[in-house]
């Protein structure tokens, strides 16, 4: 019913940039808060950034000033611009979205499949 498809991951050198995108599709009535999480090797999943439907953002201290979250409500898509990347940013990055489907009384959270970001020289 709903798909979150991520793109833009890959291998980048330290100091480089990547832009992740996450597009939501399906029988979507409303798309509320969206976010990015990451899971470094051997560690737990952690919050990177969130953005409300109105555009208010929250960014983890570890990436503040380097990463920017944004969204295009017309395209049901969110983005994560990652600059000045460091080896410790290496992780699988997951997008999430709170979505209410047509015919459903409430919304729930959905996850993307994850995209690998590797920062290495």
Image (cartoon, rainbow, N blue to C red):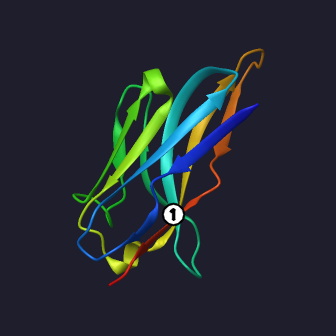
Residue 85 picture location, percent across and down: 29, 69
For the point 56% across and 79% down, the residue is 41
View extreme (top): residue:
103
Q: Is residue 22 left or right of residue 111?
A: left
Quadrant position of the N terminus in the picture: top right
Foreground of the two, 44 or 40: 40
In the figure, is residue 51 to the left or right of 29? Answer: left
Q: Is residue 89 left or right of residue 31?
A: left
In this rendering, the answer to whether 52 lies above or below 59 is above
Q: Residue under label 1, please give it.
A: 38
User: Where does the image place residue 9, in percent across and percent down from the top left?
Assistant: 46, 60
Helix, strand or loop for disc 1: strand
Q: Is residue 41 above or below residue 4?
A: below
- What is the number of callouts on the image? 1
Q: Residues within 10 Å of mark 1 (few under 14, many from 20)?
A: many
Whole-percent x, y for residue 33 in the image: 50, 35
Q: What residue is drawn where x is 35% and y is 41%?
A: 57
Quadrant in which residue 24 is drawn: top right
- Whether 53 is drawn above or below 102: the answer is below
Q: Quadrant of residue 54?
A: top left
Q: Is residue 66 left or right of residue 25?
A: left
Q: Please identify the quadrant where the C terminus is shown.
A: bottom left
Residue at the location (59% across, 82% down)?
42
On screen, residue 38 above or below 20: below
């Amino acid at each position: 019913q709903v798909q979150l498809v991520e793109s833009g991951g890959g291998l980048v050198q330290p100091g480089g940039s990547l832009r992740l995108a996450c597009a939501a599709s399906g029988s979507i009535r409303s798309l509320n808060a969206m976010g990015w999480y990451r899971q470094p090797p051997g560690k737990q999943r952690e919050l990177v950034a969130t953005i409300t439907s109105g555009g208010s953002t929250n960014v983890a201290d570890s990436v503040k000033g380097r990463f920017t979250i944004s969204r295009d409500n017309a395209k049901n898509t969110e983005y994560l611009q990652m600059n000045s990347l460091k080896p410790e940013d290496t992780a699988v990055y997951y997008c999430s979205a709170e979505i209410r489907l047509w015919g459903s009384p409430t919304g729930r959270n959905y996850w993307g499949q994850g995209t690998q970001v590797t920062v290495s020289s």
